[in-house]
Amino acid sequence: MEQDERLLHASSFGAAAVAYAEHRPDYAQTAVRWALESAPGPRVLDLGAGTGKLTATLVALGAEVIAVEPDPAMLTELCRSLPAVRALSGSAEAIPLPDASVDAVLAGNAMHWFDMAVAGPEIARVLAPGGILAGLWNVMDDQVDWVAGLARVSGSAAIGPRDTPTSWRTETADMHLPKTGVAARFGSPEQAEFPHGQRRTADSLVATIATRAGVLVMPEQEQQATLGRIRAFLASRPETTRGEFTLPMLTGVLRVRRLCLDGRQDVANRRIGDLLREYE
């Protein structure tokens, strides 16, 4: 995805913040526990927190959570649903926290929007030594026949390669790396998948898919045609025609550890990050 297209997609969610909060799934607790199991402490930053889907799971697990989100409408929904959580305006490229202030940085369905050439040094800056960065993605289980059919009917703009377990590992394996010559700040990646599911009806599943970035940025006529195909497919399947059903899902996790560089390298990489922000 080109930079301008990536920014367009990343900024599309604010207009659908209320629907996003209502329809997007939470994250499997087993996945979040695995993401955090080797973190050096309980302080967790939910980066690109959206309306707080991952934040709520972290709170339920007893983590000390700070949420950072760039979109004002999404942040408003997060504050409404989780008023006790410290929630700040900010981005992966400009995190409003002090150095070494958290033990883990988690990103729920968000890391693919980060510019890791800038975000990588920023995330490393706020992480304590040995801290963890983990990206989590909820994917539809296309090993189930009707889910595979749904993916085909929906098209890649609605359910793309990062949204199914067939290809999410390949799509996210190097998500922690910068796309430029900036030094990598994290070690070798680990990936794992954990069973998950979401109770839906045909109508609420259509509403969920309508909150995806690829659908939100479609011209209205194309968007309505896409959602119409999905409705027709769901009406044709016995699994999805009678009331509520469970959408089979997995929560996939990419986990990496902050590299412990010497002080001079830390300073040099931080200066690179400052220069990149000035250039922007």
Image (tube, rainbow, N blue to C red):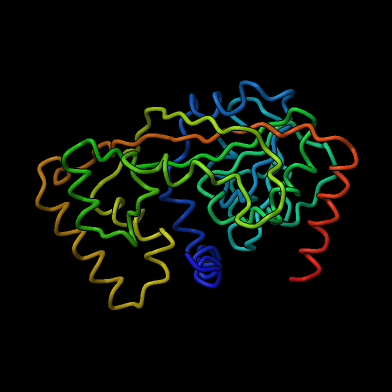
Picture residue at 37% right of the left edge, 72% below the top: 218
Question: In this view of the protein, which residue sits in the foreground, 108 or 269?
Answer: 269
Picture residue at 79% right of the left edge, 42% below the top: 126
The percent coordinates of residue 203 (x first, y second) are 26, 54
The percent coordinates of residue 83 (x first, y second) are 67, 45
Along the horizontal axis of the image, is 74 left or right of 277?
A: left
The percent coordinates of residue 174 (x first, y second) are 53, 44
Along the horizontal axis of the image, is 168 left or right of 124?
A: left
Q: Quadrant of the C terminus?
A: bottom right
Question: In this view of the protein, which residue sits in the foreground, 14 or 179?
Answer: 179
Q: Residue furthest front?
A: 181
Along the horizontal axis of the image, is 91 left or right of 107?
A: right
30 w.r.t. 91: above or below: above
Corner quadrant of residue 62:
top right
Question: In this view of the protein, which residue sits in the foreground, 39 or 54?
Answer: 39
192 w.r.t. 244: above or below: above
The percent coordinates of residue 46 (x first, y second) are 64, 42
Picture residue at 59% right of the left edge, 25% below the top: 61
What is the total number of numbered labels drawn onto the structure image?
Answer: 0
Along the horizontal axis of the image, is 53 left or right of 222?
A: right
